[in-house]
Amino acid sequence: MNAACPFCLPADTEIVLRNELWYARWDRYPVSKGHLLLIPFRHEPNFLALTSSEQTSALELLARARIRLDADFQPDGYNVGINVSEAAGQTVMHAHIHVIPRYAGDVPDPRGGVRFVIPNKAKYWDARLNEPWDSK
C-alpha cells in the first residue's frame, strides 16, 4: 500500500464491487454514464507486472462489472482499456482498468474505438490517413 496513492486504501463507501484481489469504483471523471475503474488492492503501477492470479482475478471482476452495468445502465457496448506508463497516458501510477459503457449515438462515428489513442492511425479503413509504421 502507498498512502499517497489515490487508489490505495479505498473507503468502503467507494467500493461498488470486489473480489479477493480487486475492487471496482466509479470513475471520478467519467467518460460516460457508468464508467467504472477496476483496481487491484496491491499497489503495482504496471498492469503487465501483476501476477497471473491477479490478472485472472481482474477478468473475473470485469465479468461481474458488465453484469452490473448492463442491469443499471443498459449500454449498447463497452470500451475496456488499460494504460501502462506515462507514454501510454497513465496518470495514476497504480494499475487499473477502465470499463467505459458506450451508447448508440454517443459519438458520430465510433469505428476505431480504442485505436483513437493515436488519432491519425485510428481510421485504418482510410488508407490515405494510415501509412505503415516505420519498423526501424
Image (cartoon, rainbow, N blue to C red):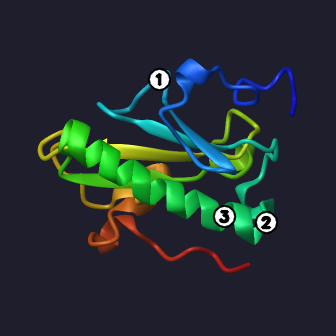
Instruction: Report the disc number at residue 54.
Output: none
Mark 3 = which residue? 55
Provide the secondary structure element on which disc 2 rests.
loop
Q: How many marks?
A: 3
Say which residue appears at 24% left-offset and 48% top-offset: 70
Front in this rendered view, residue 74 or 19: 19
Relative to residue 68, is residue 71 drawn left or right? left
Instruction: Report the disc number at residue 29.
Output: 1
- Residue 52, image x, y percentages: 73, 71
- Residue 67, image x, y percentages: 31, 52
Return the disc, 1 or 2, that comes first in the chain's sequence: 1
What is the C-alpha distance between the residues marked 1 and 2? 28 Å
Return the disc, 1 or 3, that comes first in the chain's sequence: 1
Eye-nearest disc, 1 or 3:
3
**Quadrant holding the N terminus:** top right
Quarter holding residue 57: bottom right
Quarter holding residue 111: bottom left
Decide: few, some or many residues near mark 3? Use Cα within 10 Å; few <14, some 14-19, many ≥20. Answer: some
Relative to residue 46, is residue 78 drawn left or right? left
What is the C-alpha distance between the residues marked 2 and 3? 6 Å
Query: Could you tell me if residue 125 is visible in this image?
Result: yes
What is the C-alpha distance between the residues marked 1 and 3? 24 Å
Mark 2 = which residue? 51
Specify the amino acid type for callout 1: Tyr
**Quadrant holding the C terminus:** bottom right
Residue 95 vertical placement versus 16 (above, below)? below
Provide the secondary structure element on which disc 1 rests.
loop
Extreme-right residue of the structure: 2
Provide the secondary structure element on which disc 3 rests.
helix
